Image: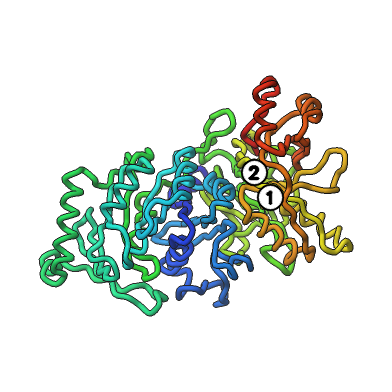
Amino acid sequence: MSAQVLSEAARRRTFAIISHPDAGKTTLTEKFLLYAGAITSGGAVKAHEGRRAATSDWMEMEQTRGISITSTALNFPYRQHELNLLDTPGHRDFSEDTYRVLSAVDAVVMVLDSAKGIEPQTLKLFEVCRSRNLPVITFLNKLDRPGLEPLELLDQIEDQIGLRPTPATWPVGSFGDLRGVIDRRTDIFTRFTRTARGSQIAPEEDVPADRAASEEGSAWTKSTEESDLLSAMGADVDLASFLAGESTPVFAGSALTNFGVRHLLDAIVDLAPAPTARLDVDDKPRHLDEPCSAFVFKVQANMDRNHRDRIAFARICSGKFDRGMVMTCERTGKPFATKYASTVFGAERTTVDEAFPGDVVGLVNATGLNIGDTLFDDSGAPVQFPPIPAFAPEVFATARPVDTGKTKQFRKGLDQLNEEGVVQVLKDPDWGDASPVLAAVGQLQFEVFANRLDIEFNAPIELSSAPYQAIRLTDKESAAMLREKPGVRILARFDGHLVALFENKYALARVEQNEPELMLDHIIAG
């Protein structure tokens, strides 16, 4: 068993894609599936029995607005490996969801729009990667369009992100005439051919350097001169510094036309690390061949509208997972049956009988499991993995059902979407469900919240801005004193923790300056 677990874990690559909105992240996700044979053409998933289904953007609001607002898990084979791709929201209002996903991966692909370069959201997401010591592979996207010079993009990566860029491939031609890339590790020039709307794998031709020089002319000369300059600077791919989070291998191309996608997908297999031992709350490693353990990094309801289900996404950290095994939830001490375990492909799911470290398993009808929960097999030692911290909310609102006859559906939706982390639902300890306050990182979260209450729970709501500007974690003793302060309100999260809401930052500053012994916690930990 131990040898099987280690062998299977070595075949896993679990990674996420991050980017600024509109940089091409969702397009690249789909093209990975195309090149791995999981779909037959761009925009269509090859599901079981030939059925068509949506890929990563499965939620109705995502499809109508053309943005990713919820993370998605996709599993597919490629080159005798099992790849677990976790797509993430690109909008800053959903950075908290992205943070949860990054707690479950071993590497990251960072997509940059070559016309825009490093953008604020890219920086914010990278800081999360750095905090988790995740190695980063960079893809310079949209090089077939007018944009910044590739060398300028490298300077931005080094100056603003602090990673040393080491280009693995380098473009030949650009600005509407991207002809191919040089693989700087092998000196092979790969010429690309466009396909209609990028719906099929781009035909590729490996061209010898002497022939490329005569056929590509000045574009070849410019590219090779730049590649030689990079070599002279020592900007060559170095696996050790990449895994240490010091350098980032850089790949060039265009996801829309499928240029450079294969090189990037190969790099995930060749460069990205396989799963390793995960540290528990005491910084003790849970070795891969120890009994099965996992942690929940995402909860999602109503992916299957017909069954109104609730699915918990769990990353397997150690041991072999067998469907039907009974695991213990560390937080509650209660057993959890895994009869309805699935692998997930967008909104599609397939029953999974076994899984290994690095895999993501969807636990269906996971009532009682919350984000951050640890699961473990009782045949081994108990384990608790570190909790997943939540972001401090920045915007606040109140909600009420438009139809008072839908109060029951409204409350059910509040509880479900709160557990998913769509928003934080804060309630008065004395008033219960009356007048809940919603707290979120960004305004778009409220739009998603209202949309899902309407579509999924048939409980349309009216949202009103709430008069709060800051929030801090507190306790019973401090709460008693804070209640007496002007402009302060005490509410409770669903996990029982108390929070203090401040009507303005001046009220907060007065408390912090005059009564620092209250020790209000700035980080709203999960």
Q: Is residue 497 depicted above or below 147 in this figure?
A: above
Q: Residue at x 87, y 38 (%)?
A: 430
Residue 193 is left or right of residue 429, and the answer is left
**SS label for mark 1:** loop
The crowding category of the residue bearing disc 2, from other C-alpha atoms within 10 Å (few below 14, some 14 to 19, many at least 20), is many
Type of amino acid under label 1: Val
Whether residues under marks 2 and 1 lie with C-beta atoms below 8 angstroms apart, the answer is: no
The x, y position of residue 143, in whole percent, is: 32, 63
The residue that label 1 is drawn on is: 423
Residue 21 is left or right of residue 414, and the answer is left
**Residue 246 lies in what quarter of the image?**
top left
Q: Residue at x 69, y 57 (%)?
A: 449
Furthest residue toward right: 405
Q: Residue at x 15, y 68 (%)?
A: 212
Residue 77 appears in the picture as rendered = no
Q: Residue at x 45, y 66 (%)?
A: 27
The x, y position of residue 391, in whole percent, is: 61, 42
The residue that label 2 is drawn on is: 393
Q: Earlier in the sequence, mark 2 or mark 1?
A: 2
Quadrant holding the C terminus: top right
Out of 209 and 120, give the one closest to the viewer.
Answer: 120
**SS label for mark 2:** loop
The x, y position of residue 482, in whole percent, is: 77, 28
Out of 410 and 7, give the one closest to the viewer.
Answer: 410
Residue 101 appears in the picture as rendered = yes
Residue 457 is left or right of residue 38, and the answer is right
Type of amino acid under label 2: Pro
